[in-house]
Image (tube, rainbow, N blue to C red):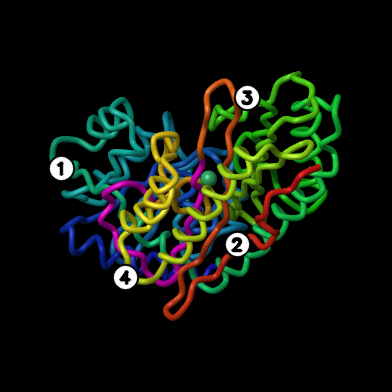
Amino acid sequence: MSSTCKIRRKALTGLLSAAKLDALVITHPANWYYLTGFTGEAGVLIVSPGAAALVTDGRFTTQVRKETSSVRLIEQKGSLLDSTGRFLRQKGIRRAGFDPAQTSVAQLSLLRKAAGARTKWIAAPGLVGTLRARKEPSELARMRQAAILAGDVLTSAINLLKPGVMENEVAAEIEYQMRRGGASGPAFETIVAFGDRSALPHARPTAKRLRKNELVVLDLGAILAHYCSDITRTVYVGRAPARVKEWYRAVLEAQTAAIAAVKAGVSCGDVDAAARQVLAGYKLDRLFTHSTGHGLGLEVHEDPRVARGQKARLEPGWVITIEPGVYMAGVGGIRIEDDVAVHAGNTEVLTRIPRDLIEL
Ligand SMILES: [Mn+2]
């Protein structure tokens, strides 16, 4: 990990010089984990050409020593941001970059005050995000494992779908199985939605009990060795009526088309359009109310966005979700989601369980 982190910091240094920054002040835990291996939840990482310093408090000093190498540990005195600002002042940092999506207005104002007037603060969005989008082989290996675990847990959850079971019970079992499988926890709040609740794309599990002849949407992900997975399947409890079958076929076809469109060099907007176009052919595009997918890695939502008009072009090493859906208020919803890795010459679907409609 430590040599990997050093290489990543070196790559970041290249981006810093291009942006004419003396240092980047990183307040986002996933980013400092990526760059140093530090897993604590409080701190600030400062990366400058050839050097990295982590400011944190006494709870985490042992952890920093254990988890990082070639990173200077600064134990904070007073508040975290005061200590950070003072450090920048001592180092004579003139141009300090920060990510405006990750550093709050209040944090920035404290940093500004502590660093003093000689330090200029420059918004530098997405520098670490750009690096994180391109997964290394060791990251892809972890993501495969996380995806397989999610598929296994989803498969076993389908066996629990008997009339009378509560959404809450199924969600609890899913998260228990994840942990049993080695996950540190769910990557997001597990979605278990029965019947008309499945028409809510982000339904929270409730005490609702499953009845016959209902759609069920299960959307779950595990964090395994720090990397996230994200998978959705839709099941019908009973024999699906013809219109449900047709909706399902449309969503599956849309998803298949979007996965087929995934290729290095293709824009994220074009992948989104591939799904939307199929649904338009079924006159269901109006009911597809969210984007087609998102980047996946240390966080469940990260760069890139796979949405309408997104110009970013897929690169080898990127991992994205493909998750079209249709939602009929008062009736139910259907969504199918898989995790896809982009390689130079091919596309790899990391989540491997079957995608056909399951009728229980
Ligand atoms: Mn997702």
* Lower position in the chain sequence, tag 2 or tag 3: 2
User: Which residue has dot 1 on it?
Assistant: 120
Is 197 included in the stretch rendered in magenta? no
x, y percent for residue 181: 79, 53
Camera-nearest label, 3 or 1: 3
Pointer 2: what residue?
A: 143
Give the residue displayed 41% in from the left and 72% down from the top: 316
Looking at marks 4 and 2 on the same chain, the residue that comes earlier in the sequence is marked by 2
Residues tagged 4 and 3 counted as in contact (Cβ below 8 A)? no
The residue depicted at 58 percent of the width and 39 percent of the height is: 334
| Residues at marks 3 and 1 touching, judged by CB atoms closer than 8 Å | no
Q: Which amino acid, mark 3?
A: Arg
User: Badge 4 is on which residue?
Assistant: 265
User: Residue 149's image quarter?
Assistant: bottom right
Crowding around mark 1 (Cα neighbors within 10 Å: few <14, some 14 to 19, many 20+) is: some
Q: What whole-number distance in Å separates the C-alpha atoms at marks 4 and 3?
A: 38 Å
| Residue at the spot of label 3 | 197
Q: Secondary structure at mark 3?
A: helix
Q: Which mark is residue 42?
A: none
Dot 4 or dot 1: first in sequence order is 1
Is 311 a magenta residue?
Answer: yes
Task: Estimate the x, y position of residue 192 in percent, counting from the top left.
Answer: 69, 33
Kind of residue at disc 2: Met
Within 10 Å of disc 3 (Cα), the crowding (few <14, some 14-19, many 20+) is many
Sequence-wise, the earlier of marks 4 and 3 is: 3
Q: Are marks 2 and 3 in contact (CB under 8 Å)?
A: no
Q: Secondary structure at mark 1?
A: strand
Q: Which residues are magenta?
A: 305-325
**Inter-mark Cα distance, 4 to 2:** 22 Å
Q: Position of residue 209 (x, y in %)?
A: 79, 22
